[in-house]
């Protein structure tokens, strides 16, 4: 049983035997035991079979103990036989073990990446609820205490995008997270996050920083080393210089063995780091899930069942659709395409805008969704950039006015008026989670 757990109200660390958290919340023994059991399970979970490391390191040591060439040879055939024994041990024993271990670590990296996506997806979903539904999409400008939720939302977006890019994930790799009644399909949230124009710019890196461990692991392929070993064997002839040829081949081979040793060392470090990261993200996921169920879920459920809020959501739908159209059009403005010089010269302003717009939306992949929304709104495609900007300005002002009027009523319904402090207080949980995964 874990002696250090966390408070189900604020997410801060808590000694199991303490009755109250510093936030003033008191947990029952049953709550404490459930959390402790979850944390113990996390700490006991092993992602990569440690035997793979042990047998690989043992095989590597055996190579140096039993397969290094002698200091003296009298005939070339003896030297060649020892060299071939060494090569065969590498190809049939050590290299397959290294590759098997590395494949296991790569699978573990994929699992860890999905865990990260789940945590960041939850952060995005929670902050989206707080900012858009509970307080309203324009409330941040009026309420300074909401700025921190905006920061956590940006943090979740950035980290989620970075995780997907670095680990070469696609949406088929990511399972939908059922986050209670929060009303957000995480995959849908992820999709919209990655296509936001301003955010896409953040993820466009010409070069990703990589640790020396990653560099050694990816650039020194042991399978390639195996091919090189086979190539070196061809240097050895059957003439009087056979011993010298064996020595030269072995010298080159030993240089490769240093690289293979580096791979083994780096895999060992990486395995330890993955296990550590796995525990951190699993713990963060448990904190988010536990504190959400304790504090936010009842509020979300009550809000979703409130007649006033239901009517508001229904009336807001056209405005949401308009804002999605605006978002897509702004994304298209940052989508790079090739524009022929003569085409620009011959066509007028409207023709150029429409022609380039079609190229951009085709590249962007949002054509069907754009048509679906415009059909629902019964509006036409913008003919010029000026038309779009006028539409953006007008519809945003109308949306702000709609929110201003409706929020006066929404602020008075009990589920909102009586829970403001609890919702704002959830920022403490997000802070604790961010601290866990960034320190």
Image (cartoon, rainbow, N blue to C red):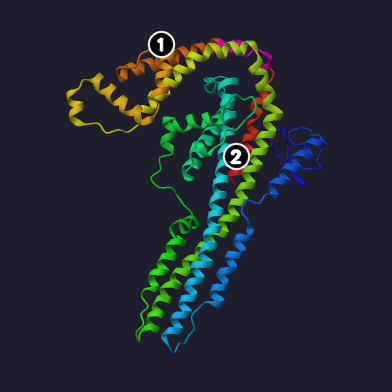
Secondary structure beneath dot 1 equals: loop
Magenta-colored stretch includes residue 33: no
Magenta-colored span = 406-416
Q: Nearer the viewer, mark 2 or mark 1?
A: 1
**Residue 283 sits in which quadrant?**
top right
- Tell which of 95 and 202 is nearer to you: 95
- Tell which of 21 and 126 is nearer to you: 126
Q: Position of residue 107 (x, y in %)?
A: 55, 49
User: Residue at 57% of width from left, 69% of height from top?
Assistant: 59
User: Residue at 45% of width from left, 87% of height from top?
Assistant: 73
Q: Position of residue 206 (x, y in %)?
A: 38, 45
Q: Is residue 391 visible?
A: yes
Q: Position of residue 50 (x, y in %)?
A: 63, 58
Mark 2 closeness class: few <14, some 14–19, many ≥20 residues within 10 Å? some
Q: In the rendered image of this protein, does residue 75 appear above or below residue 251?
A: below
The numbered dot on residue 92 is none
Mark-to-mark CA distance, 2 and 1: 43 Å
Q: In the rendered image of this protein, does residue 315 appear above or below residue 437?
A: above
Q: Is residue 14 visible?
A: no
User: Residue at 58% of width from left, 55% of height from top?
Assistant: 271
User: Residue at 21% of width from left, 26% of height from top?
Assistant: 344
SS majority, magenta: helix
Q: Is 357 displayed left or right of 228 in the figure?
A: left
> Which residue is tagged 2?
434
Comes first in the chain, label 2 or label 1: 1
Q: Position of residue 160 (x, y in %)?
A: 52, 38
> Which residue is tagged 1?
378
Magenta-colored stretch includes residue 409: yes
Query: Decide: marks 2, 1 in contact (CB < 8 A)?
Result: no
Mark 1 closeness class: few <14, some 14–19, many ≥20 residues within 10 Å? few
């Amino acid at each position: 049983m874990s002696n250090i757990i966390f408070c189900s109200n604020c997410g801060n660390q808590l000694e199991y035997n303490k009755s109250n958290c510093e936030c003033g919340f008191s947990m029952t023994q049953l709550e404490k035991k459930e959390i402790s059991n979850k944390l113990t399970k996390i700490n006991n979970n092993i992602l990569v079979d440690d035997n793979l490391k042990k047998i690989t390191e043992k095989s590597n040591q055996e190579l140096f103990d039993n397969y290094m060439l002698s200091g003296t040879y009298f005939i070339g055939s003896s030297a060649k036989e020892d060299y071939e024994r060494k090569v065969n041990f590498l190809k049939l024993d050590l290299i397959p073990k290294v590759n098997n271990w590395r494949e296991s670590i790569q699978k573990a990296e994929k699992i860890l990446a999905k865990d990260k996506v789940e945590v960041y997806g939850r952060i995005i979903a929670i902050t989206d609820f707080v900012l858009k539904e509970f307080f309203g999409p324009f409330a941040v400008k009026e309420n300074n205490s909401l700025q921190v939720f905006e920061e956590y939302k940006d943090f979740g977006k950035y980290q989620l995008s970075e995780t997907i890019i670095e680990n070469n994930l696609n949406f088929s790799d990511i399972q939908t997270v059922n986050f209670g009644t929060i009303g957000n399909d995480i995959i849908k949230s992820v999709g919209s996050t990655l296509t936001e124009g301003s955010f896409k710019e953040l993820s466009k890196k010409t070069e990703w920083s990589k640790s020396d461990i990653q560099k050694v692991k990816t650039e020194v392929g042991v399978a390639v080393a195996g091919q090189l070993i086979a190539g070196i064997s061809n240097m050895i002839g059957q003439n009087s210089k056979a011993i010298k040829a064996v020595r030269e081949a072995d010298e080159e081979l030993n240089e490769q063995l240093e690289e293979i040793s580096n791979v083994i060392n780096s895999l060992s470090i990486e395995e330890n780091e993955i296990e550590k990261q796995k525990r951190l993200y699993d713990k963060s996921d448990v904190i988010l899930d536990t504190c959400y169920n304790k504090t936010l879920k009842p509020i979300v459920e009550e809000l979703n069942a409130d007649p006033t809020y239901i009517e508001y959501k229904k009336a807001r739908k056209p405005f949401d659709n308009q804002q999605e159209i605006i978002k897509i059009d702004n994304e298209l403005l940052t989508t790079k395409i090739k524009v022929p010089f003569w085409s620009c010269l011959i066509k007028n302003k409207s023709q150029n805008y429409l022609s380039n717009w079609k190229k951009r939306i085709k590249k962007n992949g949002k054509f069907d969704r754009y048509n679906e929304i415009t059909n629902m709104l019964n509006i036409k495609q913008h003919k010029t950039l000026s038309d779009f900007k006028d539409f953006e300005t007008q519809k945003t002002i109308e949306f702000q006015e709609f929110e201003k009027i409706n929020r006066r009523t929404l602020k008075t319904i009990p589920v909102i008026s009586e829970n403001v402090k609890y919702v704002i207080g959830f920022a403490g949980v997000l802070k604790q989670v961010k601290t866990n995964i960034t320190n």
